[in-house]
Amino acid sequence: MSTLEKTTDEILQLAAAHFKVPRENLRADDDFFKTLGINSLQALDLLTRIEQHFHIELPDYELQGVSDFRTLAERIQSRL
Amino acid sequence: MKNFTGKALSWTIAGGTVELRLDRAPCNEIGSATLAELEQFVDALSGAGEDARALIISSARSEGFCAGADLRELFERSQAMVQRERLAGVRDFLERIHRVMNAIDSAPLTTIAAVHGVIFGGGFELALTCDMIIADKMARFAFPELRLGLIPGFGGIPRLKRDIGNAVVRDLLLTGRSINATKAQSVGLVSQLAAEGDALRVARATAAQINKFDSKTAAAAKRFIKPVPHDELKREIEIFCDLFTRPAVEAGLRKFVESNDALPYLP
């Protein structure tokens, strides 16, 4: 598994656990707003989980235009 | 000081601790209703005397502590007024909210903001009036005002400058980004981190410790270490009012109010 795939998989696990959805229902290319049915405040919760898990700071302006898990993983990779 | 339950908040007093609880859907946005009840609160607090040694401010809303000013009310009221009335209305609101914030900031009791979730804009400014912030690990802090063409107007910049270094002040103000509770603690904004859902419990334990001390000594210590930056607070109102009547602000407010975007709280 590549580093990007591993990061994506960790995000999917975090999202599944936080929003209490089955991990197998989530895919890397899913639009997380639609798949998880979340609003911007809930997206900030996910951002906080991600920052805690990866021990990074990810400014929320870097999430502009990002709606799928794989692109989110790329943003995280650039901060690791 | 008698217990109170209003439309936007409530307060109780027991064992020397006053608890002010914000509770207005969706996330305690500060508009005219909240302001009026906050004014009642600071009036009641000023008459509490020796009964009150500690104050905890928290939120009953699951979404967070406070998402800031009520931008919908601000926009809708502004639309019904000509420009001169609009500016006078905003100035009056700012002067009233500054009186509330200054009263909490300089209150002779020890004050704690017990925060979780969103602490944005005016909510962040309210938390900054307190002597210490105790934050849930999932809390996030931001000053998103610049994307509306405004600066924080409830005393945020002078109080942020009072508490932390300029690098972080400028980062928060000029990017509008949010930071999590761990970062906020690392830069000196947050006194204590609490586990998820535990900020109020930790604040109550802290208040119980505060209640052991002589109240006059605690008040003297506070006056010594926490001056209210009155001159800068007055300048903030002037700068806010200068900016407020520009078309960019009306456009920014309209965009926020009318947006169907899934990301209204992201910069």
Image: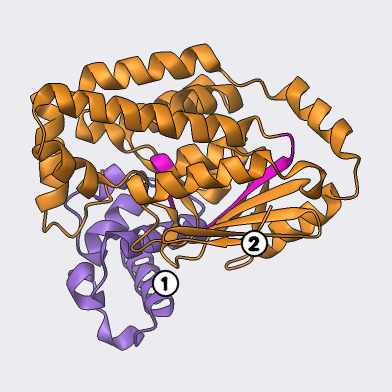
The residue positioned 46% from the left and 49% from the top of the image is: B37
Query: Residue A3 occupies which quadrant of the picture?
Result: bottom left
Mark 1 residue type: Leu
Q: Residues within 10 Å of mark 2 (few under 14, many from 20)?
A: many
Q: Nearer the viewer, residue B90 or B253?
A: B90
Mark 2 residue type: Leu
The hue in which chain B appears in the rendered picture of the protein: orange
- Could you tell whether A50 is left or right of B81 in the image? right
Q: Does the magenta portion include B41?
A: no
The residue positioned 57% from the left and 49% from the top of the image is: B182
The residue positioned 73% from the left and 34% from the top of the image is: B108
Q: Residues within 10 Å of mark 1 (few under 14, many from 20)?
A: some
The residue positioned 39% from the left and 83% from the top of the image is: A20
What main secondary structure does the magenta stretch of the protein show? strand
The hue in which chain A appears in the rendered picture of the protein: purple
Residue that label 2 marks: B200
Q: Quadrant of the C terminus of chain B?
A: top left
Residue A37 in the image, given as x and y percentages of width and height: 23, 75
Residue B75 in the image, given as x and y percentages of width and height: 17, 42
Residue that label 1 marks: A14
The magenta region covers B108-122
